[in-house]
Image: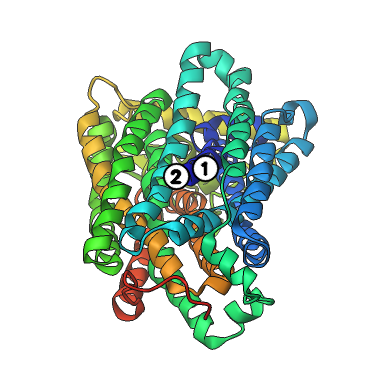
Amino acid sequence: MPASAAGTAFEWYDFFIFVPLSSILARTFFAGLNDAAGYILALGAFAAGFAFRPLGALVFGRMGDLIGRKSTFLVTISMMGGATFAIGLLPTYEDAGLIAPVLFVGLRILQGLALGGEWGGAAIYIAEHAPAGRRGYLTSWMGSAAAFGLGGALLVTLGTRLALGEAAFDDWGWRVPFLVSAILLALSLWIRLKLHESPMFQQLRDSGQQSKSPYRESFGEWRNLKVVLVALFSMMVAQGAVWYTTFFYSQFFVERIVKVAPGTVNGLMIALVAASAPLYLFFGWLSDRIGRKPVMLAGMIVMALAIFPGFQAVTRAANPALVEAAERAPVSVVADPAECALQFDPIGKSQFRSSCDLAKTVLANGGIPYVNVAAPPGTLAEVRIGAAVVRSADGRGLDAAALAALKGDVGARVRAALADAGYPPSADPARADITTVFAWLMVLVLGATALYGPQAACLVELFPTRIRYTALSLPYHIGTGWVGGFLPATAYAMTVATGDIYYGLWYPTVAIVVSIVVTALFLPETRHRALDRAA
């Protein structure tokens, strides 16, 4: 069983290698945008892979139900490894212009399609081999596989960064973690070729009872469709919100908003991932004893209660100077709301010319928390930093050179006032309490692993063998692919738009609360269900 999960870990590595490199990839493939827009678009490229995971679930889920689990494994892992290796060979925006981000996003889409068929197949393969009383524990290796994949991505990135130095890593060394995937692809194929077909599927195929129309049976018959919907809105919506807030948005938050050094963030995330690996196994084992539903529901509740106080505590511990400055000299933008645009420019065309836009651009790019104060129509915007007032300027009607000069002047005056008020340009390592940061993030890890550990077993147990691959994969990848995959970009855009560094946390919080209600009311307990049923 762990051998099957090992192949999955390599595939997660391929998909997750984007995470510790997001800032560099933003500069490499989306050069020319302002900092906030480039970063959001890089997160959007990350999300693009997730967006296509449900399509991959449909394509490869059908293949898995028609021709078998093993053959589908081989196709998905070859697609994933090949796409990851190719990213390491791409030209930069500076070298090739728009073709560079187009190719980059295209390869992320291929990765998403491949992963859409991978997870469900691996979970089913393990569960259909497992004894009834150990399905929770054995399928929980899928959670550890994700942890090992993410941990491997972080370790390879950190090791390459330390070996080459920051300058070389930013220039070309970021390609190394992608190129390493060629070695992992070879190992994965070797592992998968040694596996045998699932005995339950083989028996179904030998008797001629496998589904001839997995789509119609899964989604066209209400008895199965209602189970798909319950799976989606109970555990899967929560899964996307919980897991990707814990292991992805937290990294973006600590590095981009709280301004902790990237190397420190990588080390912190490696420690979290390492600590999480045995917890998946523990909660999977526990679900074999007391049931899937109570363990997963407990994980959701922990996360819902901890998310806001946890991120606030992380900010205070990691960058106390930022919190002190915000309390001592809060920042507000006083402007005519009609002249304030959303600080989100995914294609780099908006020039943000109004006085409000110029002021907010500086604050958004600096990760400075602020509040909006409405002013009468026609008022020239100003930034208030405690008692200090910095008047903005109106750039409408200026040519490009004059506008750039005006933005530079406004930015320099705002940044000088922020510095005078004690706002730090980055977190001070001497004052950072990384132990407290780690402790609070571990609370989130407990919620994530309690939900994820029993999840594979529960999903497999919900559906009959003949449509299991198709019916299971779609809700999983809608939840993780759409709810989770779009979480970093959406939450960060919400933060940039409002000036409230915690506002983006409402996205996962609402999703988790929905899932708590649906799980409590509609999700059945499944641990005693037999898997060898055709309908």
Q: Which residue is mark 1?
A: 12
Q: Position of residue 130 (x, y in %)?
A: 40, 58
Vertical side of 482 occupied by 36: above or below = above
Q: Which residue is painted at 25% across and 27% down in the image?
A: 432
- Please state which amino acid type lies under the numbered disc 2: Ala
Q: Nearer the viewer, residue 87 or 404?
A: 87
Residue at 65% over, 80% down: 216
- Position of 321 relative to 7 (above/below): above
Q: Position of residue 15 (x, y in %)?
A: 56, 42
Q: Quadrant of residue 508?
A: bottom left
Distance (Cα) linking label 2 and label 1: 6 Å
Label 2 crowd bin: few (<14), some (14–19), many (20+), radius 10 Å: many
The residue that appears at 23% across and 51% down in the rendered structure is: 309
Nearer to the camera, 191 or 340: 191
Residue for point 47% across, 49% down: 488
Residue underneath mark 2: 146
SS class of the residue under badge 2?
Answer: helix
Query: Which is nearer the eye, 44 or 519?
Result: 519
Residue 386 in view: no
Instruction: Estimate the x, y position of residue 459 in percent, counting from the top left.
Output: 43, 66
92 to 166, vertically: above or below: below
Q: Quadrant of residue 178?
A: top right
Q: Please, what secondary structure does the residue beneath circle 1 have?
A: helix
The residue furthest bottom is 222
**How far across and how far down the image is residue 525, in percent?**
31, 74
Labels 2 and 1 touching (C-beta < 8 A): yes
Give the left or right position of residue 159, taking residue 438 as reference. right
